[in-house]
Amino acid sequence: MTASIANAVAGPQAAATPDFAAIKTRQKAAWASGDYAVVGTTLQIVGETLCEAADLRAGERVLDVAAGNGNATLAAARRWCEVTSTDYVPALLERARERAAAERLHAVDFQEADAEALPFDDGSFDVVLSTFGCMFAPNPPRVASELLRVCRSGGRIAMANWTPEGFIGQLFKTVGRYVPPPAGVASPAQWGSRDRINELFEASARSVATEKRHFAFRYRSPDHMLEVFRGYYGPVLKAFGALDADGQQALAADLTGLMKQFDAGQGGGLVIPSAYLEIVITRR
């Protein structure tokens, strides 16, 4: 999810100086609604790919920030790492905990934590991960500072962030036309731009490697995907809830139209490649 959509459902336009605490409170309510895990589990391959890109090694101390239902957490634990999994929505952590228990992945510590105020000492982790998570926090410089702080010198920060031009970036933009985001808060889709990553991390990095990848959303049809997102994906659920009947009908039509525009399934079910930026930063 990006801040564009997460903030889009956060509430009325904010003042020129954003009230980050109030925005996060509304974001938490959005993510806690529905059942994000229904959508999140389909993204598991991204967590696996990211852990390979970060070249995780057995025994490394790994932190998953804004872990959601635990895709990167599980991927790291499967590689025999010592994993700490964090999110500021307890219900999402509970889903991740259930998945880890089902796979008997015991070397995972689950902690409720805010990406903008991580409760860990400087240099506590060899690797810090985030898949479609940190990008939604309303204060990007603060998040970047925290990721750098808790990563040891020579360690890696690895992220997967939706791009502005990809399907999810465009979905956020569509929702934002109906439920505008707070003023003064940067679009989370900026985290999918190499320029933004350089701005946030380059001064503290030995190296920054990025690669554009695609995740394919696969559903039976546009109507099926809309049903799932509207029923389980909290920010979309909240967006529909903020509109009257006519607004809901118009948003539904625009979203299904967007799905058809990106569909590469050629009539064999809905297949939507959505671009994201894979990032591996080596800490100074």
Image: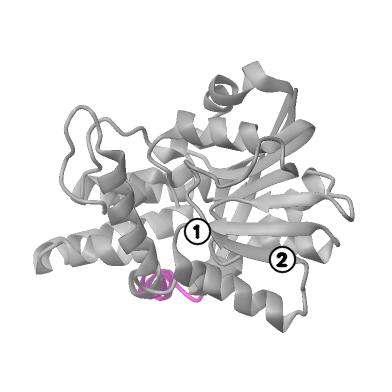
Q: Residue at x 42, y 76 (%)?
A: 224
Expressed as whole percent of the image width and height from the top left, the position of residue 151 reads 70, 37
Secondary structure mostly seen in magenta is: helix
Q: Residue at x 54, y 68 (%)?
A: 93
Left or right, 68 with respect to 57, comes to: left
Q: Is residue 150 above or below residue 66?
A: above
Q: Is residue 220 above or below residue 248?
A: below
Expressed as whole percent of the image width and height from the top left, the position of residue 122 reads 66, 35
Local SS, label 1: loop
Asked whether residue 233 is in view, the answer is yes
Q: Which residue is mark 2?
A: 108
Asked whether residue 218 is in view, the answer is no
For residue 62, the mark is none
Q: Residue at x 55, y 30 (%)?
A: 145
Left or right, 150 with respect to 132, comes to: right
Q: Which residue is mark 1?
A: 263
- Nearer mark to the viewer, of 2 and 1: 2
Left or right, 241 with respect to 20, comes to: left
Give the magenta part as a residue range: 220-228
